[in-house]
Amino acid sequence: MERPWLRGPLFDVALLAFCWVPVYVWVVLVLGLGRDGIGLAPLPPAEEARALSLAVLVVLGLTFVHRHYTFVLVYGDRETFAQRGLAYVASPLIVFGIAALLLGVDGPVRAGGAVFTPFTVLLVASGVWNVWHTVQQRYGILRAYAGRAKGGLEARAHARRDRALVWTLVALMSLSLPVLRPATFGGHPSAARVLAALTPYVTHPLYEALLALAGLGAVAVIAWWWRAERAARVDKGPRWIFLGSTVLLLLVFAVHGPIVGYLCFGAAHALEYLAFVHHYAERSWRGRPERGLAAMLLGRPLAFAPLLIAGFGLAFLGLQDHRTSEVYLAYYVGGSMLHFLYDGWIWKLRERKVARPLGA
C-alpha cells in the first residue's frame, strides 16, 4: 500500500502543512503586528508602521522567489516548454506589454464616484487572481494527498467535495471578518479603504441574515464532505493534518485581522510551493537521461534548495532601489500574472506527467 505522505512526516508537516508557523510567530510575537488578538497591547502607530513595512518586505521577497521557480520549470525543461511553446513565447510579450501600456496612461479615470488609474485595474485583477490562485494551491495539495490515499478519495466526485469545502471555509471567513475584526482593517490604508466600502453593506440588517445563511450552508457542505470522507477506509492522517493547517490559517484572519492573515497566508503559499516544487522535481528527474536547467537547479536533493532560494532572494534585494520605477512595477505585476497563468497550465494532477512523481 502507498504511503499516505507525499514525502514523509517531517517534510509534510514542517515544510508543507505548517511552514507558515515561524512566520506567524515572527510577525505576531516578535514584530507585534496584530498582537491585540491574543490580549496584548497594540503597537504605537509609528512602530506598527515600521513593523508592517518589514513584514511586507519579507513576504514580498518570498513571493518573488517562488514565482521565479515557475519560470525555471517552464523555460528550463524542454518537455514542459514543448507542450505550449507558442504560448510560453507570446504570453510574456502580451502581459508585460499590457502592464507597460497601462502604466504609461496618464490621468485618473472616474467611475461611479471612484477615482482610479488604468494600472490600478490591473493591480486589482492581479490581487483577485492571487486569492484564487493561493486557495487553489491548497486545494491542489489536498487532492495530491487524496491521490496517494486512494480508497475513493481520488475520485472526481470527492474532488468536487474538497473544492466546495475549501472555498466554503474561505467564503465564511471572508463574510465574517468585517463583523469579527473591523478595527484590524485600519492598520493599512488599502484595508481601511476596503472596510469603508464594505461598511454600508456590513451594517445593513440583511447582512446578519446573510451571515447566518452562510453559516448554515457551511454546515451542510461540511456534513456532505464528511460523510464521503469518513466512508473511505484508508489512512487520511496526512491529508487531515494539511486540511487542519488550512483551517488554522483562516483562523489567523479572525484572531489577528486581515493584514496579519494575508501576510501569513502569502508566506505559507510561497514556502509550501518551494518545498513542493523541489520534491516534485527531485522525483520527476530521477533516472531521466536528459538534463536541462530545471533538472540542474531543482532536481537535486532537497539540501541544495537553500542555495537557489538565497540566489533569488539576493536578486530581490538587489532590485529594492528600483521598486518604485515603472519598469520594476510592470515586471513585478506582469510576472505575478504569468506565474498564475503558468501554474494553471503545468500543475494538473490528472496528467500522468504530474501525478507519477507524486505517487498520485
Image: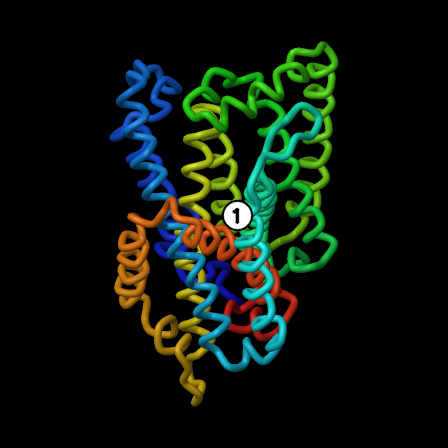
State the residue at coordinates (70%, 59%): 155
Mark 1: secondary structure: helix
Residue 15: % across, % down: 37, 53
Asked if one can make out residue 73 in the rendered structure from this viewpoint, the answer is: yes
State the residue at coordinates (71%, 50%): 160
Quarter assignment of residue 222: top right
Q: Which of 40 and 258 is in front in this view?
A: 258
Residue 304: % across, % down: 28, 68
Q: Which of 317 and 222 is in front in this view?
A: 317
Disc 1: which residue: 103
Residue 312: % across, % down: 32, 60
Left or right relative to 333: residue 157: right
Mark 1: which amino acid? Leu
Left or right relative to 322: residue 188: right
State the residue at coordinates (47%, 64%): 70
Relative vertical location of residue 176 with respect to residue 25 in this rendering, above or below: above
Q: Which colour scheme is used?
A: rainbow
Asked if one can make out residue 149 in the rendered structure from this viewpoint, the answer is: no
